[in-house]
Image (tube, helix red, strand yellow):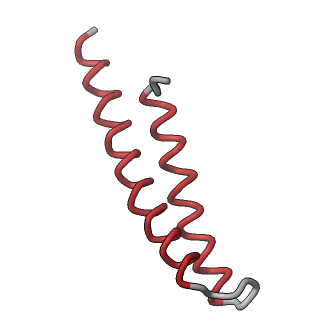
Amino acid sequence: MKLTPTQFVVLGFLLVTYGMVMPWLMVLQIIEATFFLSFTSYIATFTGLLFGVVGVATYYRERRRH
């Protein structure tokens, strides 16, 4: 399955949003802070940022060719 640049950006946005909401819920003590949730939140934020950058770079690279 090949993702389009727009799909990369949307996926990156969703991952970064997850990485932002989960720690917020942990601080408000709505969900219990565990190592697993903290780690997945960090990984989601980092991966989402990378996906967003790759999506934007790919979008502009393809747009430049046309």
57, 39: nearer the viewer? 39
- The residue lying furthest to the right in this view is 30
Q: Residue at the location (31% across, 29% down)?
A: 58
- The residue lying furthest to the front in this view is 36
- Residue 31 is left or right of residue 19, and the answer is right
Quarter of the figure with residue 22: bottom right
52, 35: nearer the viewer? 35
Q: Residue at the location (71% across, 91% down)?
A: 29
**Residue 17 x, y percent position in the rendering:** 57, 60
Q: Give the answer, above or below, for where 18 lies relative to 38.
A: above
**Residue 44 x, y percent position in the rendering:** 48, 61
Q: Residue at the location (53% across, 43% down)?
A: 11
Q: Give the answer, above or below, for where 5 lies relative to 28.
A: above
**Residue 8 x, y percent position in the rendering:** 46, 37
- Residue 56 is left or right of residue 2, and the answer is left
**Residue 66 x, y percent position in the rendering:** 28, 8
- Residue 37 is left or right of residue 62, and the answer is right
Q: Give the answer, above or below, for where 54 lies relative to 28.
A: above
Q: Residue at the location (25% across, 24% down)?
A: 61
Number of residue marks: 0
